[in-house]
Image (cartoon, rainbow, N blue to C red):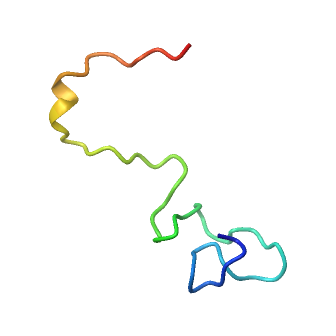
Amino acid sequence: GVVMNPVDHPHGGGEGRAPIGRKKPMSPWGYPTLGRRTRKRKKYSDSLILRRRKRS
């Protein structure tokens, strides 16, 4: 993303290896990424999920 031009990616452009320059990192399509939830709020299987799966 950083290597691209501003027309190609939200992180593109700038002088040298410039930082992102936005409040949040963005996907190539301009949606916020890193920490953004992607699951639908009213997914049909929500009623089936009772507790979070433990990570070992």
Residue displayed at 68% across by 68% down: 20
The picture places residue 38, in percent across and down from the top left corner, at 37, 48
Farthest residue, direction right: 16
In the picture, measured across the screen, residue 55 lies left or right of residue 38, that is right
- Name above or below for residue 41 compared with residue 20: above
In the picture, measured across the screen, residue 6 lies left or right of residue 19, that is left
Quadrant that contains the C terminus: top right
In the picture, measured across the screen, residue 32 lies left or right of residue 18, that is left
Residue displayed at 59% across by 61% down: 25
The picture places residue 15, in percent across and down from the top left corner, at 81, 83
In the picture, measured across the screen, residue 41 lies left or right of residue 54, that is left
- Name above or below for residue 11 compared with residue 53: below
The picture places residue 45, in percent across and down from the top left corner, at 19, 30
The picture places residue 4, in percent across and down from the top left corner, at 67, 79
- Name above or below for residue 45 compared with residue 49: below
Residue displayed at 57% across by 76% down: 9
Quadrant that contains the N terminus: bottom right
Q: Determine the image quadrant of residue 24.
A: bottom right
Residue displayed at 32% across by 43% down: 39
Decide which of 23, 41 is in the foreground and name it.
Answer: 41
Tally of numbered discs: 0
